Amino acid sequence: MNLQRLSIFGTDNIGVYIYTNNKYTVVPRGLDSETKENIVQILGTELIEAEISRSFLLGIFISGNDNGILLPKSTIDDEFRFLKENLRDCRVEVLNSKVTALGNTILTNNKAALIYPEFNDIEEKIIKETLGVEEIRRGKIAQMITVGSVGVVTNKGGLVHVDTSEKELKELEKLFGVKIDIGTVNFGSVFIRSGLVANDKGTLVGASTTGPEILRIQKALGE
């Protein structure tokens, strides 16, 4: 597996800023050329520089898979048009919900999605249709309702909060159709998404992620 440690804007919380699937990686404007080249080399995607809600926190606001991308209702019209034009091989939709941190509240791969328990039926339907998933379920991971913040799942594997029970792991594996393991990032953080950006081609981890954590991540993500 292609894997590299990375810091951006002086922080190891790279997942706060970056969204990726197997086609596109969306990053904040203002990254240096070397960092952008490294991201493209590791993740093997087209790179799109953008903003959401006039913010650089793209990883918090965006959720999606290879089929579709969900943006929060705080997305400004010109931002939506820009992403719609540039993410041309994905369906791009704005989710009209009071929940705006979609990256923290939706965990998805191409097969399924686990979502924040407080999404309503209409929001759940829109999420399912946009992502084109076979199955969608509301739930928690290790008693955490912000399921997108404590896990990363690809079409090859997944890593979730270290306190996830064996029963939960089996349920998640059945839902997503891949092997899932527990772990941490950035020297012990349970907020997996904040320090891990991954697709089926490669993985970026926060620079303070330790060697043992990296070995666990590589194993969990199918390598």
Image (cartoon, grey):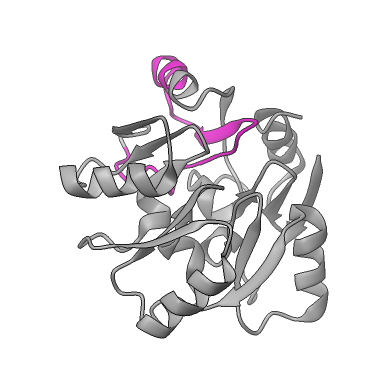
Q: Position of residue 97 (x, y in %)?
A: 22, 60
**Would you say residue 55 is visible in this rendering?**
no
**Would you say residue 104 is visible in this rendering?**
yes
Image quarter hosting the C terminus: top right
Instruction: Indicate whether residue 152 is drawn in magenta.
Output: yes
Give the residues in magenta: 144-171
Instruction: Indicate whether residue 213 is drawn in magenta.
Output: no
User: In the figure, residue 164 lies in which quadrant?
Assistant: top left
Q: Position of residue 72 (x, y in %)?
A: 33, 66
Q: Is 207 placed above or below 52 here? A: above
Query: Residue at point 40% right, 15% down?
Result: 167
How many numbered circles are shown?
0
Query: Residue at point 68% right, 52% down?
Result: 205
Q: Position of residue 4 (x, y in %)?
A: 79, 53
Q: Is residue 214 left or right of residue 71?
A: right
Query: Residue at point 49% right, 27% down?
Result: 176
Q: Is 101 placed above or below 9 here? A: above
Q: Is residue 148 left or right of residue 24?
A: left
User: In the figure, residue 74 lies in which quadrant?
Assistant: bottom left
Q: Is 188 placed above or below 12 here? A: above
Q: Is residue 2 left or right of residue 46?
A: right
Q: Nearer the viewer, residue 171 or 50?
A: 50
Q: Is residue 84 left or right of residue 120?
A: right
Q: Nearer the viewer, residue 131 or 20?
A: 131
Image quarter hosting the N terminus: top right
Q: Position of residue 47 (x, y in %)?
A: 69, 68
Q: Is 119 placed above or below 174 here? A: below
